[in-house]
Image (cartoon, rainbow, N blue to C red):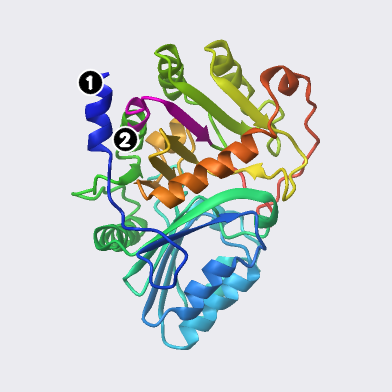
Amino acid sequence: MKLRLLATALFLVFSGPISHSADADSNYFFTPEPSAIPEVLAAIGGAKTSIHMMMYHLSEPTIIEALIAAKKRGVDVQVLLDQQTVAREKPTGAFHALTAADVKVIKSSTGFSISHYKTFVVDGTTAYVMTLNLTRITNQVRDVAYITRDKDTVKFLEDLFALDVANGADQGVAAPKMIPDNIVLSPVNSRARLQALIKTATKRIQLEVENFSDTALANDLIEAKKVGITVEVLVPRCNMGAADFNMPIAKQLAQGKVDVRLMPDPSTTATPYIHQKSIVVDGERAFLGSENFSFNSLDHARELGIIISDRPVVQKMMEVFVSDFNQGLNITQAEAFTCPVKTFSVDTAEAI
């Protein structure tokens, strides 16, 4: 217990107070909401000097148009896109549309399996760290975004953007020399920091993620359960092209007495597809980011997340988790559930 309390103290990272007032140091929002995400459009529309975006999937037309409009009014707009996603794009996709409008678009390094982060910085002062892609299906997908003006976090993200632009140019995998304690970055420290966060728990762990296949993290949750910690896990039951998807890890967790639930299809605003990647620990601190809990995501991809202790947002994450968790299938129900057949389209859907 003493080791857990010491680890807890090390993870109480301050990121500033949070509220919904215009002058707050930090803020947040959740989806489902309209695909033309109001908070993102407002940020892009209000940019005065720069927008530096690192995005896995970008297909929502109004956001693409907003980036082009920002460029036209003199804002330095630069967008770093995953090179594999660009390769699958149609000629009308984001890369081609932005490039045609003289927006600087950079393809990510092939040295990373994918570049999966979902973040951007406006005017060098405000950072958006998100679990959501900027696509057309946000009205039926559960995600969360954290907005911060914390100077160290913003500076790190600007430096990371510049580093990964250089990585894209030479197909490198260079890592930042210094990473703030609240930053979770693949393939550098995601596994270590997420496992350490889990081990700080003394009362409760509430975890939700789209893709969970990493047995080491699953074992950490099972060990937490063994010492009396309440462990709750929520994942989607179905995914495009993968009927069993999270079932193997769900069965492993259930056998370890973890309370695991699986959100069924079809995805709606009321029962959203679980795309959010987050961990809430003891109702006091939380991780959110682009990292799925898989070997590829933690150890080979470029991913970005943040650990926060802003009480209002952590409390809201708990509330949303409980609401979704209560609608999930238990393991027996999930085994009996038949997933509908879906067709994957990079322009209308998001996987991984």
* Position of residue 167 measured from the top left corner of the image (x, y, whole percent): 32, 55
In this rendering, the answer to whether 25 lies above or below 191 is below
Q: Quadrant of residue 340?
A: top right
Please identify the quadrant where the C terminus is shown.
top right
Point 57% across, 60% down: residue: 134
Point 80% across, 36% down: residue: 341
In this rendering, the answer to whether 216 lies above or below 302 is above
Q: CA distance from mark 2 to mark 1?
A: 19 Å
For marks 2 and 1, the one nearer the N-term is 1
Residue denoted by label 1: 2
Depth order, front residue of 85/76:
76
Asked whether residue 102 is in view, the answer is no
Q: Viewed as shown, does residue 132 lie left or right of 236?
A: left
Question: Magenta residues?
Answer: 197-208
* Position of residue 138 measured from the top left corner of the image (x, y, whole percent): 65, 56
Depth order, front residue of 295/37:
37
Q: Residues within 10 Å of mark 1 (few under 14, many from 20)?
A: few
Please identify the quadrant where the N terminus is shown.
top left
Give amino acid for label 1: Lys
Q: Tell which residue pokes out farthest to the bottom in this image.
A: 73
Point 63% across, 73% down: residue: 62
Q: Viewed as shown, does residue 46 lie left or right of 181?
A: right
Find residue 193 and name its label.
2
Depth order, front residue of 330/36:
330
Give amino acid for label 2: Arg
Asked whether residue 224 is in view, the answer is yes
* Position of residue 347 measured from the top left corner of the image (x, y, whole percent): 67, 57
Q: Secondary structure at mark 2?
A: helix
Q: Quadrant of residue 329?
A: top right
* Position of residue 122 measured from the top left corner of the image (x, y, whole percent): 39, 71
Q: Residues within 10 Å of mark 2 (few under 14, many from 20)?
A: some
